[in-house]
Image (tube, rainbow, N blue to C red):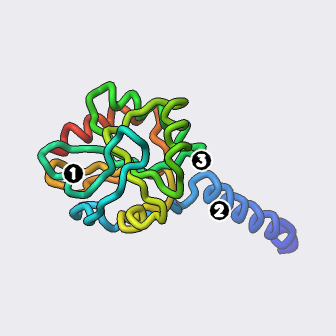
Amino acid sequence: MKRWLIWAPLAVFAVLFVVVATRLMHPADTAVHSTLVDKPLPDFRLDPMVPGKPGLASADFGKGQPRLLNVFASWCIPCIAEAPQLMALKAKGVAIDAIAIHDKGPAIADFLRRNGDPYAAIGDDARSSVQMALGSSGVPETFLIDGRGRIVRQYIGDIRADQVDQIARDVAAAR
């Protein structure tokens, strides 16, 4: 009987260790997902962010061509990391528009010079009002808008190289 009492604390510790280790290796998804997935893009109109490139409005979507809508900022480090992947998507024929949040035109222009410009249009969302209307919780985030103007998918965080082919297939299927 006494032997069992000696080993009981060790057994309790081992069980707790396994539970904690499992939770650390498989953390819960803490990303905030948009409730607008499978719903129409909310109405908005944003002024142009940089000279020579149009602004952005919800009316630009839903004309039969699926598009990616990327929410980004020049000061966002993960946005820099995803820039090559957005350029690869553009090279595959994927149409990409952007919403720049809490930023200035010269900073965005410099960002595009340094990292490439995959965008057909960039809207200036200085107060993040459109970002919030989309249900976006941070940058970068990318939404797939189908040819009817509905949000069909949300990609949270920077797009990785191993996601490019799948995203291109997602866009092609979203007609």
**Mark 1 residue crowding within 10 angstroms, few (<14) / some (14–19) / many (20+):** some
* Residue marked by disc 2: 19
Residue 72, above or below 87: below
**Residue beneath the point at 21% across and 51% down:** 60
Residue 175, quarter of picture: top left
Disc 3 and disc 1: Cα gap in Å? 27 Å
- Image position of 95 (left or right of 70): left
Q: Number of marks in the image?
A: 3
* Residue marked by disc 1: 60
Which secondary structure lies at badge 3?
Answer: loop
Closer-to-camera residue (43/45): 45
* Residue marked by disc 3: 75
**Residue beneath the point at 21% across and 44% down:** 66
- Image position of 8 (left or right of 107): right
**Mark 3 residue crowding within 10 angstroms, few (<14) / some (14–19) / many (20+):** some
The disc labelled 2 sits on which kind of residue?
A: Val
Closer-to-camera residue (41/111): 111
Circles 3 and 2: CB atoms closer than 8 Å: no
Residue 154, position as x, y percentages in the image = 36, 53
Closer-to-camera residue (166/94): 94
Q: Earlier in the sequence, mark 3 or mark 2?
A: 2
Disc 3 and disc 2: Cα gap in Å? 38 Å
Q: Earlier in the sequence, mark 3 or mark 1?
A: 1
Q: Is residue 160 visible?
A: yes
